[in-house]
Each structure stands twice: as structure tokens, then as C-alpha cells.
Amino acid sequence: MTTRDKHDRMANAIRFLSMDAVEKANSGHPGLPMGAADIATVLYTRFMKHDPKHPHWADRDRFVLSAGHGSMLLYSLLYLSGYEDITLDEIKNFRQVGSKTAGHPEYGHAAGIETTTGPLGQGLGNAVGMALAERILNAHYGDGLVDHYTYALAGDGCLMEGISQEAISLAGHLKLSKLIVMWDDNNISIDGPVSLSDSTDQVARFAASGWNTLRADGHDPEAIAHAIETARQSDRPTMIAFKTTIGYGAPTRAGTNKAHGSPLGADEIAGTRKALKWDAEAFAVPSDILDAWRLAGLRSAKERKAWEGRLAGTDGEKRAEFERRMRGELPEGLDAAIVDYKKKLSADKPKVATRKSSEMALEVINAILPDTIGGSADLTGSNNTKTSQTKPITPSDYSGRYVYFGIREHGMAAAMNGMALHGGIIPYGGTFLVFSDYARPSMRLASLMGIRSIFVMTHDSIGLGEDGPTHQPVEHLAALRAIPNHYVFRPADAVETAECWQIALESETTPSTLALTRQNLPTLRVEHDEDNLSSYGAYELETASDEAKVTIFASGSEVEIAVKAREILEAKGHPTRVVSVPCFELFGEQSYEYRHAIVGDASIKVGIEAGIRMGWERLIGSNGIFVGMTGFGASGPAEELYKHFGITAEAAVKAVEERIANGG
């Protein structure tokens, strides 16, 4: 067992690496790493199942630093434990351009960083998703291959954010017993004492949400170890309230907000060195302490080798599937199934809402792809996210493939990200498009991390009808299209919907949003094409009878309107082509030649979408005609609303004829 003196010196290595890095960068948050160093030292030297030499081991424990501003805690742990990605030079390069040690932990920068955190509470939501993924895969593959814990370190800010309640109530309901949240209970936020703004009994809140709760001294290694060991025996998720002092050891700033988010300064650091009896120079870790840390980093190597032996001894087919899923690859046969399904759709010509088209596509996909785990924020019947293969996941049975997330859009999206990050699972979850506002921070982080989370957003326009403007999205497509590395799909019929699902599944490093209708739409792609035309982002659906004078671009439910407008214009002697635009982002990825050919040279360009104009200039130009929304919607039947707001074939034709009359 580690002596108290040795523990203190190992924890102090974290403290001084953190304060030195923040000082050198002249930027950062030293308080949390200094205050939580004892907790982290006990966790990583006595409990964490991980192998720095094999950092992507599938059955490793996951550690999530939800309080991402304390990033130097994580970077110090990774360097000290022997992760090759985080060198001492990287520690010295903290918060600099191009470094792996970004201001807040960023997934993909270095092994051992399980998720991107910083927006407070997101890590808690991710941890819930990781813990749920572990249970789902355990139910399928057994304890021999999947049996690990998820640990999350959260601060007061994480617990104040609303997402925390969504996350913890879901975890408590599902009894995710292998989830352990460690609360850095230091009573300090940026403004000062937490009492300035909050008087919540957090332990009682977690207990009310179905959690096991414990309290312990966050600076007593034996108390910390006892609490974690006790938590590991619980049949419920556990929250441990670790009482700590922010900026522990700093002579004048410890326990105050001055330790939170700025460098301590040379004098305070010198005083801390004296108070904690640390004689080493800046960034230097005494060799015996570094050796002790590196030895601790090897503590799970035997366990990892034993796991590899169990994997090798697993039935060949089951092992191959497990390895494929953990690599994130799709199984053979999916592409052929989609092509066959598209052929059937073009022949059958169903007239259904694209939310129903999505369900139909998922019925095909889920039969072939065991990786998919679906869900909805209490809108299953409206989002059409459940198929015959997706039995419910319950607190007593994790073998299903469907999560009833409840009315928790933000928590759902964060948990989906956690599931995707864990590996072995492709999550999709549904709500109304207007409520993407409630999920957007998690959707943005999915894009920043480059992970395959799929957001199914139905009721995508005024076409939802009577629920009115509170539920009718108008600016949401533009807002989501503004997120970098995010595919926003708005399919026009059942064929495009199947194609968009195929692209979303194939896009391992880009999350997707499918914007789907409530109202029925005809099948427009009646000629079968094996090629995935939606993958081009935009393509010519209807050609002009002669050299095109008019090009109409449209997405989703408005492509039907564009086709009708073309018929009228052609009948009036105006050669018109129609371009379906299921995905702006994919169109932007095409070659210049392709984009130029699709935009074309027609003198009149029209865009039709039941949303705002923003973004359509890339297709129709600043002088193009836009038929869409200029304000909020209204309550009424969908067909009447389209007439009321002038989103009709007749309105498009009138605008074109006026432009022609004016010499356009």
C-alpha cells in the first residue's frame, strides 16, 4: 500500500505540473487540479483499469473530466501514468496553438482524453451514455469482454447546469451501477462562494434521482479509496461528494475564487512550494515519484492481457462482430440491402411522410446492423424511431436496442455522444426539429469531436400544422447548417430518406441531423438509380425541355412544389429544371466542376424551402428568388398554412413571371 507521504508527493506532482503549466501559459485554471489531485491520484493508482501502452483497449475504464476547465489535472495524469501522447513538452506547451494540451480537453488530441469537455455538465451527460453503452454491450457480449466502470469528475458548475438533472435522472432510472460521479465539492465558483447563487442540497438531489450517495474527505486518501470501493459495490449509480479545498496548498488563494481561473503568480507558487515541501524546479518531477506513477500506470497490464486471451478464445463470428463494432465499421450487406430497398421504393411509389420513410428505412437497416441503438425524447410515435428489432432497454434488462429518454433532449443528445465515444454503438435519437434548440450544445460538440451521432428531427416546418409557431421551426435549418462538420439532411421522399440514412451511417467522423416531415409526400424518384444521388448534396431531379431559363432549387417537402412549378412554367414556354438539395454540406464538398454544372447558367434561379432564406444565396445568389418564410409560422392546417405564407407552386410561378416581365 502507498504510504501517506508517498501519496502526498504523487498528488503534489499533479498540483505543481498544473500550476507551472498555467503560469507558463499565463492562462488557465489551477484551482481544480490542486484541489482534486488527491482524488485523481487514488483513482488512477488504485482503481482505474487502463493501460497507457494500449490506450484504446475496449474494456478499459473510462474517466471523464466533466469540469473541463481543470484540464491540467487530466494532462498531468496522462503524462505521469505514461501515455505517450502527453509528453513533458506538451505540458509546457499548455494552451498553445497546435498543442495536444488544449485549454479544455479535446477528444482526438491525445489518447486518454475520452471526450471533449468544457461546456459544464456535458461530461456528465457523456458519462451516462458511456455507462449505458457498457451495459448494453455487456448484455450482448458478457462479462468476459465488457465489464468496466465509468468515472466522472464534476464541479459545482456541472451540477448547476440544467443538463445535469436530465443526465442524472436518466442514469438513476436505468440503474447504471457502473457509473461513479465524483463531485469536487469546494463551494467555490467564478463569482465567489457558491452560496451567492445556489443553496441546493446536491446529495439529496442525486438521492431523489435514484442514486447511491456518499460523502468523504477529498484530501484523505484512505477515505477516498473507501468511498470509491463502496461505490463499486452499489446496485445503483453513485455520487461521492468529496469535500475539497480549491487551490489546495496555495497560501493566500486556497479556498477562494482567486484560485479558480487565473495563474497563481510567482510569489504564490513559491509559497505553495514551501507549504507543500516541494523542492523540485518548475516542471520537474522527482525520479522516485515519476517511477511510482509509471509503475501505477502498468497496474492493469496483466488484466488487459487476460482480456485479450478471453477475446481470442471467443467464438469466431462473435469475436469478429465485436472487433468490427469497436472499430466502427459497417457490416457487409448493408449497401446491397439499401440498393434493393431503393429499387422497391421506386417501384411501389409510397406516399408517406419522411418521418415514416425514416422508420421504413430503419426497419431495413436495423435488421442488418446490430450496432444501432435508437431512442426518442418522449416522442417515439411522432419521431417513428422504433422498429420491430428495437426492444426497450430497461433497468433490469439492457439487451434491448431502444432507449426511452423521456423529455430530456439535452441529456439525450449528450448521452448519445457518450455512447458513440464509447464505441461499439451507433446511436440515433429523435425529437421535433424545433427542439434541436434544447439539444444544440451537444450537437455542436458531436461536430467538434467528429463522432457518429445521428439526430432524427421530425416535424420540420410549418407543415406540422396546428401546433403552431412554438413548434414550427423556421430558422432551425439555417442554424444547424451553420455548425461546422455537421450534415443536415432534408430528404424529399422515401428514396432520398433511405439514401440520407446510408450516408449518416457511413459518416464515421461527422454527425448528422435528419429533418423529416409530418405531412405525406409523394415518391419523386420513380426511376431507380443504384448511385446514392443524395451523397452529392444536390442533383438534377427534373431536366428542362430546352436550354434552361429557370432553375428551381428545393429541399424536403418543397421539392414536390418545385416539380409542380416546373410543370406550369414549362407549359407556359419557360424551360425549367429542378434541383433537389438534400444536403448543403455535401454539395459544398463536391468538385468545382460539379457544383458549377448543378447551379447552372439559368438567368433566373429560385430557392424553395419552408424556412428562412439564410444560406440559400450559395445556390440562387443574392439576386435569386426565394420562396419561403420571413417570420414565424401560425396555427392551422398544413395545406392552409402553405397557402397563407405563399409557399406554393403558383407563388413560385408568379415570382418567376414577374422577373421575366422585368427583363430577368
Image: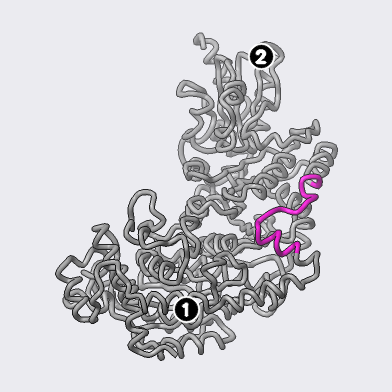
- 122 shown above or below 276: above
- Whether residue 439 is visible: yes
Which residue is at 47% across, 66% downward?
83
Q: Tell me where residue 289 appears, x and y as whole percent.
A: 36, 78
Q: Tell me where residue 276 appears, x and y as whole percent.
A: 24, 81
- 643 shown above or below 463: above
Which residue is identified by label 2?
Answer: 575
The answer to if 333 sits in the magenta stretch is yes
Give the quarter of the image for residue 137: bottom right
Tell me which label, 1 or 2, sits earlier in the chain. Answer: 1
Residue at the limit of the structure toward the left, as seen here? 267
Looking at the rendered image, the quarter that the N terminus falls into is: bottom left
Taking the image as shown, residue 311 lies to the left or right of residue 165, namely right
Q: CA distance from mark 1 to mark 2?
A: 74 Å
The answer to if 543 sits in the magenta stretch is no
Q: What's drawn in magenta, residue-wise? A: 320-337
- 617 shown above or below 366: above
Kindly identify which numbered label has been placed on residue 239: none
Main secondary structure along the magenta-highlighted residues: helix
Taking the image as shown, residue 580 lies to the left or right of residue 219, namely right
Q: Nearer the viewer, residue 459 or 300?
A: 300
Residue at the limit of the structure toward the front, as seen here? 287
Q: Given the image, on which type of amino acid does mark 1 rest?
A: Ala
Q: Nearer the viewer, residue 16 or 469?
A: 16
How many badges with numbers are in the image? 2
Q: Tell me where residue 417 appears, x and y as whole percent.
A: 55, 60
Asked whether the residues under the numbered discs 1 and 2 touch, taking CB atoms below 8 Å apart as contact, a structural biologist would say no
Q: Given the image, on which type of amino acid does mark 2 rest?
A: Pro
Give the quarter of the image for residue 145: bottom right
Residue at disc 1, secondary structure: helix
Q: Tell me where residue 214 appears, x and y as whole percent.
A: 44, 87
Which residue is identified by label 1?
Answer: 296
